[in-house]
């Protein structure tokens, strides 16, 4: 029996990466493969609850490694000249920014995590590794001469990443020197062909959890498999009483996701309340427990706030979803055949919204005025880097309501139906054995 070890990224919220790998592990186990997961502290219990062998990559102990003999004695990431107000949008270019975000701030941290991964490989003895944006999976494959499948998408596709795919002239950013913490490990493993961060995510096969329409990767030189969403649509879902009344009032579900969400949540929720109060819409807003729903509850008869709701249930029972543009949510919305409006907090989410708009199944509303973005600068052990940020939230009814009219456009649902059917077919015909036979 082939043994497969799945290694999802557990950072930036991690919900999407972990959920995909949980689904894939269950699918592979049902096909007769032996699977196990590597999860960090935050999501470790999810693997246990799913009944899957789960190994802990313990990043909490890294606090003992936060001090080192050479300067900087305490490697960390810090914001230079923090803004007075939390930004409402962050612009960045590519996966290099994920290295400091994910805590790879020194060679000691990199090697500490890699040693844990080595122990897990020696215990589980996998035949194949599957990574989902985890920067050590490829190196682990090199160390143990194991084939690697990488879950990927166009924005970070290792052979040819295309982050700002909608722009002819790419903006220039001061990126972090993101490979620097990995250089001692790369030297130790004699890996000399890593030139950019995305090279740390290379694999023998690339698994794209979408269709070619959603992720237009065209590459004849490398093995690419489109699996459809690695997500389950269960028939038994939570009933949403607020959406249950039989009437003609459109039902709108608003979610900002549970991952790397916006910093200005209160401004956003207050704007949604102000825009939709006393309108002909029934609006259900989940705060995702990022703020207590009671702060906004009871201020409107037609806008209801809740700390948590089963997201897929709310999607399926709504007429329109206003979302942040996270990949997991976007795939659930497309599989459910629902139109959506993306109000993103950062560039990667903006890209998902632009894809929905290009497909004619959704729209995009940037949450700031057409202003010059300011530089948000950071310092870490390998110098300075910067993102661009917007300071003021700009959401008005006249911007949003024309987009909502898509729920009355039959052509939108025809296009949604085509995308939905392609995704469902890929999902239904996906064969884990065929995937592994390609490595």
Image (cartoon, grey):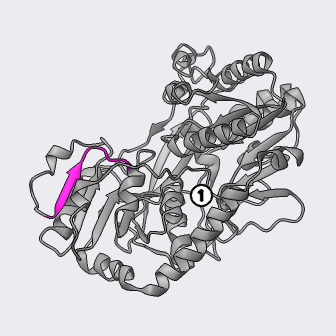
Specify whether residue 242 is painted magenta: no
Q: Quadrant of the C terminus?
A: top right
Dot 1: within a 10 Å radius of its alpha carbon, few (fewer than 14), some, or many (20 or more) residues? many
Tally of numbered tags: 1
- At a point 58% along the width and 58% down the height, the residue shown is 173
- At a point 61% along the width and 70% down the height, the residue shown is 421
Q: Is residue 40 above or below residue 100?
A: above
Image side of residue 270 versus residue 340, left or right: left
Task: Tell me the quarter of the picture where residue 251 sits.
Answer: bottom left
Expressed as whole percent of the image width and height from the top left, the position of residue 217 reads 74, 66
Q: In this view of the protein, can residue 88 be seen by the observer?
A: no
| Residue located beneath label 1 in the image | 93
Q: Quadrant of the N terminus?
A: top right
Image side of residue 300 versus residue 269, left or right: left
Q: Is residue 399 above or below residue 194?
A: below
Q: Is residue 38 above or below residue 281?
A: above
Task: Tell me the quarter of the picture where residue 371 sits.
Answer: bottom left
Image side of residue 21 versus residue 183, left or right: left
Expressed as whole percent of the image width and height from the top left, the position of residue 113 reads 66, 23
Expressed as whole percent of the image width and height from the top left, the position of residue 160 reads 77, 60
Image side of residue 70 versus residue 317, left or right: right
Expressed as whole percent of the image width and height from the top left, the position of residue 286 reads 29, 51
Q: Which residues are magenta?
A: 302-310
Q: Secondary structure at mark 1?
A: loop
Q: Is residue 228 above or below residue 433?
A: below
- At a point 66% along the width and 55% down the height, the residue shown is 209
Specify whether residue 308 is painted magenta: yes
Q: In this view of the protein, can residue 340 be seen by the observer?
A: yes
- At a point 74% along the width and 46% down the height, the residue shown is 150
């Amino acid at each position: 029996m082939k043994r497969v070890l799945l290694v999802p990224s557990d950072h930036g919220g991690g919900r999407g990466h972990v959920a995909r790998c949980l689904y894939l592990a269950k699918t592979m186990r049902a096909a007769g493969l032996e699977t196990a997961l590597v999860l960090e502290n935050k999501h470790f219990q999810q693997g246990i609850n799913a009944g899957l062998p789960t190994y802990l990559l313990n990043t909490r102990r890294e606090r003992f490694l936060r001090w080192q003999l050479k300067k900087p004695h305490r490697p960390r990431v810090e914001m230079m000249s923090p803004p007075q107000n939390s930004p409402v949008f962050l612009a960045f270019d590519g996966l290099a920014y994920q290295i400091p975000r994910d805590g790879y701030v020194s060679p000691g941290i990199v090697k500490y995590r890699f040693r844990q991964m080595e122990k897990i490989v020696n215990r589980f003895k996998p035949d194949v590794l599957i990574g989902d944006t985890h920067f050590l999976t490829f190196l682990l494959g090199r160390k143990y001469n194991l084939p690697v499948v990488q879950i990927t998408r166009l924005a970070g596709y290792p052979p040819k990443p295309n982050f700002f795919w909608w722009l002819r002239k790419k903006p220039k950013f001061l990126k972090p020197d993101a490979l620097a913490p990995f250089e001692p490990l790369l030297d130790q493993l004699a890996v000399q062909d890593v030139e950019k961060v995305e090279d740390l995510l290379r694999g023998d096969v690339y698994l794209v959890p979408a269709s070619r329409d959603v992720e237009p990767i065209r590459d004849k030189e490398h093995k690419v498999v489109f699996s459809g969403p690695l997500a389950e649509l269960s028939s038994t879902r939570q009933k949403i009483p607020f959406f249950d009344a039989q009437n003609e009032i459109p039902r709108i579900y608003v979610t900002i996701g549970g991952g790397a969400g916006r910093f200005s949540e209160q401004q956003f929720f207050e704007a949604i309340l102000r825009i939709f109060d006393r309108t002909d819409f029934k609006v259900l807003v989940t705060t995702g427990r990022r703020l207590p729903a009671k702060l906004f509850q009871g201020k409107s008869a037609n806008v209801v706030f809740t700390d948590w709701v089963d997201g897929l249930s709310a999607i399926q029972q709504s007429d329109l979803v206003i979302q942040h543009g996270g990949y997991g949510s976007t795939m659930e919305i497309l599989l459910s055949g629902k139109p959506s409006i993306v109000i993103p907090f950062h560039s990667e989410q903006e890209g998902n919204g632009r894809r929905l708009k290009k497909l004619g199944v959704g729209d995009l509303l940037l949450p700031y005025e057409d202003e010059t973005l300011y530089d948000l600068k950071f310092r870490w052990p390998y110098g300075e880097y910067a993102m661009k940020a917007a300071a003021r939230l700009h959401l008005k009814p006249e911007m949003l309501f024309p987009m909502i009219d898509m729920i009355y456009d039959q052509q939108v649902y025809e296009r949604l139906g085509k995308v939905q059917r392609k995704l469902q077919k890929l999902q239904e015909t996906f064969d884990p054995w065929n995937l592994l036979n390609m490595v």
